[in-house]
Image (cartoon, rainbow, N blue to C red):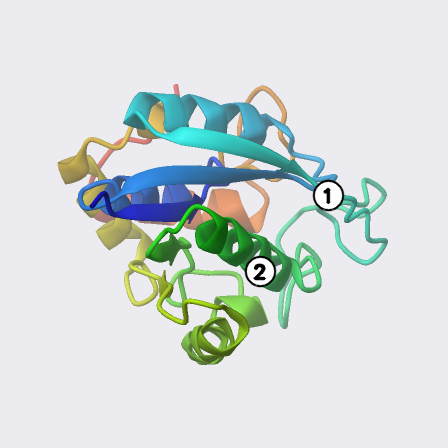
């Protein structure tokens, strides 16, 4: 029997590392979401990473053009927030993504869903915290016919440096990943995602392949 998993793949370093962790034990189907994000460059990155890993992928299109998030509203700057939940937060995003992943997992008889959530070096999103995933695991148990689909968050308690070091050992192609929320030709170095990526590579003692 082939072990199957559905992996949420955004194209960033966390989701890419998670995919390479998952593919050690599972045949993976990557879900790549096109939800109206301004940094659509991450979609092309995700496809490239899925192909490099030898994994199948599906593009899921959603309309999440929410006025309150700078990831979907180009009128709001993506520069780092000073305190509280940042304006890059997309309300309900992980709940929506995980619910769709759960649906795909049950349909293809997968045993697992993987998401690259992190609660150490992160922006403070409420749906990246351990308590949220404990609750979602119970929801998954109650909401599915098989009741046996596991929801894995292998990076939840790792620093960005630890994630990068693990990914290097696994052969993650970090030069193909994309993290910047602006999605231009070069990382902006001003958004939360750029900040934590740079912090991780610096603390890991590794040069970011995207920085020339």
Q: Quadrant of the C terminus?
A: top left
Residue position marked by numbered label 1 in the rendering: 62
**What residue is at 38 percent from the left and 54 percent from the top?**
114
In x, y percent, where is residue 190?
Answer: 58, 42
Q: Element at badge 1? A: loop
Is residue 186 or residue 172 the one in the foreground? 172
In this picture, residue 27 sits left or right of residue 88 = left
Judge whether 92 appears above or below 188 on screen: below
How far across and down, in percent of the image, does residue 39 sit?
65, 34
Answer whether residue 47 is visible to the viewer in this image. yes
In the image, is residue 77 above or below residue 117? Answer: above
Q: Is residue 211 visible?
A: no
* Nearer to me, 176 or 106: 106
Nearer the observer, disc 2 or disc 1? 2
In this view, the residue in front, 188 or 110, is 110
Report the residue at 59% width, 46% height from top: 191
Whether residue 34 sits left or right of residue 128 in the image: it is right
Q: Which mark is residue 99?
A: 2
């Amino acid at each position: 029997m082939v072990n199957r998993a559905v992996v949420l793949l955004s194209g960033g370093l966390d989701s890419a590392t998670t995919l390479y962790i998952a593919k050690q034990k599972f045949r993976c189907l990557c879900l790549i979401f096109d939800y109206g994000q301004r940094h659509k460059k991450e979609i092309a990155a995700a496809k490239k990473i899925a192909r490099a890993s030898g994994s199948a992928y599906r593009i899921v299109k959603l309309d999440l053009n929410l006025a309150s998030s700078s990831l979907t509203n180009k009128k709001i700057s993506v520069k780092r927030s000073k305190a509280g939940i940042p304006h890059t937060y997309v309300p309900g995003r992980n709940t929506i993504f995980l619910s769709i992943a759960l649906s795909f997992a049950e349909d293809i008889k997968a045993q697992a869903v993987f998401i690259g959530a992190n609660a150490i070096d992160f922006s403070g999103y409420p749906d990246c915290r351990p308590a949220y995933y404990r609750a979602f695991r119970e929801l998954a148990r109650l909401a599915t016919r098989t009741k046996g689909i596991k929801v894995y968050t292998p990076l939840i308690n790792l620093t960005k440096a630890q994630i990068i070091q693990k990914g290097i050992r696994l052969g993650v192609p970090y030069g193909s990943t994309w993290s910047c929320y602006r999605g231009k030709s070069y990382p902006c170095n001003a958004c939360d995602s750029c900040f934590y990526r740079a912090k991780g590579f610096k603390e890991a003692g590794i040069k970011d392949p995207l920085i020339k």
